[in-house]
Image: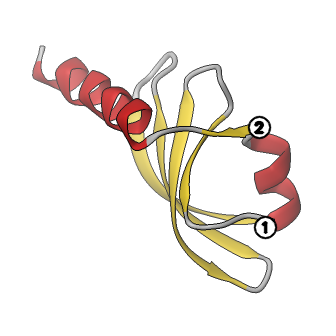
Amino acid sequence: SVKKGYYTDSYGLFCKVYDIEGDNIYVYELDTTDLPSLTKETYYLRSFKETYYRKCTKEEYNKALNKIVNYFKD
């Protein structure tokens, strides 16, 4: 089952689950691939599980966030 916390697909996509209501998973999503971005997204449980393969640490999430911030600073 999905709980609040940090997740990744292991290929440059990270998220922080900040709320869960039924089958809706609310996340702050960091995409560090081609065009780095930070977005607020809603996933259905099934699509969340298909996208995010494992939990990650807060440090991994913060490192990804720093990568995005630095991209826009340069």
Q: Quadrant of the C terminus?
A: top left
Q: Residue at x 40, y 36 (%)?
A: 37
Nearer-N-terminus badge (2/1): 1
Query: Relative to 20, is 45 above or below?
Result: above
Residue at the extreme bottom = 22
Q: How is the image coloured?
A: secondary structure
Front label number (2 vs 1): 2
Query: Relative to 64, is 58 above or below?
Result: below
Where does residue 20 sit, x and y in percent of width and height? 63, 78
Q: Residue at x 64, y 19 (%)?
A: 11
Most foreground residue, 42 or 65: 65
Tag 1 residue: 44
Q: What is the number of the mark on residue 5?
A: none
Judged from the image, the secondary structure of the residue bearing numbered disc 2 is: loop
Measured in 3D between alpha carbons, the distance from the residue under mark 2 to the one under mark 1, in whole angstroms, is 15 Å
- Local packing at callout 1 (Cα closer than 10 Å; few below 14, some 14-19, many 20+) is some
Query: Relative to 70, is 13 above or below?
Result: below
* 37 horizontally vs 50: left or right: left
Q: Residue at x 66, y 69 (%)?
A: 25
Q: Residue at x 50, y 16 (%)?
A: 34
Q: Quadrant of the N terminus?
A: bottom right
Tag 2 residue: 53
How many badges with numbers are in the image? 2
